Amino acid sequence: MAAVPRWADENVLVGFDTADDAGVYKLTAELALVQTVDFFTPIVDDPYTYGAIAAANSLSDVYAMGGRPVSSLSILAYPAQGEVSDLEAILKGGAEKMREAGCSILGGHSIADEEIKFGYAVTGTIHPERIKANAAARAGDALVFTKRLGTGVISTALKRGLASEAHVEESIRSMLTLNRRACEEMLRYDVHGCTDVTGFGLIGHAREMALASGVTLEIAVDEIRFLPGAVGYARQGAIPGGLKNNREFASCVVETVRPIPQEIEDLLYDPQTSGGLLITLPEADAAKLVAALEGAYQIGRAVPRQPKAIRLI
């Protein structure tokens, strides 16, 4: 990335310097654009569900910034001789989820590729002074998380024929749930920082937030909630390749202050699809947010910077 040309623009309010969820570009004193793009290969068998999950995942970055998604462009790679009915189902699933979000699809681009890939570039709007960046966590903040972990492990268990139908359905339900409600609720409180937990896993995204904010995030491992079946599948070795990559990338900034079962530690690095929002805000507001938002729970706090950016306690 160091070789990529860069230049100053006073209207770029959030770029890629802090590995934030989306970029923000100021148009006027009261209006800025939030822009992001995301796409991936199928993680479920049903093409309609795959399309819907891809849309929910693409929208998530805008919600993580505190923005409102307004328009999108689809990105598609599909085999030239692939089933047209499956392609139609993928696009329909994505379109239905975009309609649920109130986000218009303006068009898109496709190429012929033997490996299917699908997602969206999404544009949202936000007030320039109300951005919820990953670089704004403060020492003393509570950490609130809005979904359970384990989608990557469950997807891997499905591919290996280990996952039960009930566990897969619960994982799909989580991935199909938009972060819109979580965004709307958090904006009622004095939120300082936010990021969504997706491909880098909880530890990877927490690392980005801690380093960008100049704090250490203390994560209370016993408070973290997992999707049904996830712990068992991790114990059986259903470990996605992305989990291993995340551990190699982020474990150097992690301090573990007590023994943690291997399967639990694995899940902290598990790459999530359409995962929850990790939010930092004052303790009093955190309790109110948890009470107001179903599925949300506290997992720790931000403290003054320690030798390591993440402490597992």
Image (tube, grey):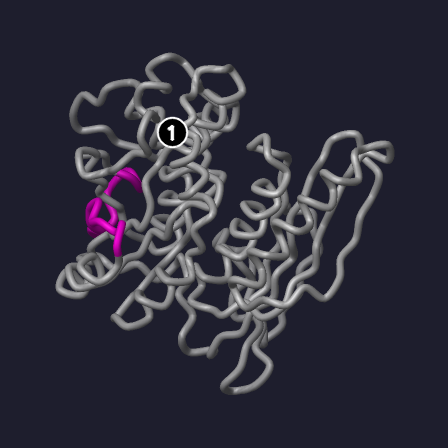
Q: Quadrant of the C terminus?
A: top left
Task: Report the residue marked by disc 1.
Answer: 166
Residue 71, image x and y in percent? 63, 68
Indicate whether 23 appears above or below 177. below
Q: Residue at x 33, y 46 (%)?
A: 147
Residue 16, image x and y in percent? 55, 56
Q: Nearer the viewer, residue 244 or 249?
A: 244
Amino acid type, label 1? Ala
Which residue reaches farthest bottom? 29
Q: Nearer the viewer, residue 169 or 273?
A: 169
Q: Residue at x 79, y 53 (%)?
A: 109
Q: Residue at x 42, y 43 (%)?
A: 173
Indicate whether 285 appears above or below 223. below
Residue 57, image x and y in percent? 52, 49
Residue 153 found in image quarter: top left
Q: Is residue 206 left or right of residue 73?
A: left
Q: Which residues are magenta?
A: 294-310
Q: Nearer the viewer, residue 149 or 101?
A: 101
Residue 100 within the segment the image draws in magenta: no
Q: Is residue 140 left or right of residue 150?
A: left
Helix, strand or loop at label 1? It is: helix
Indicate whether 191 appears above or below 214. below
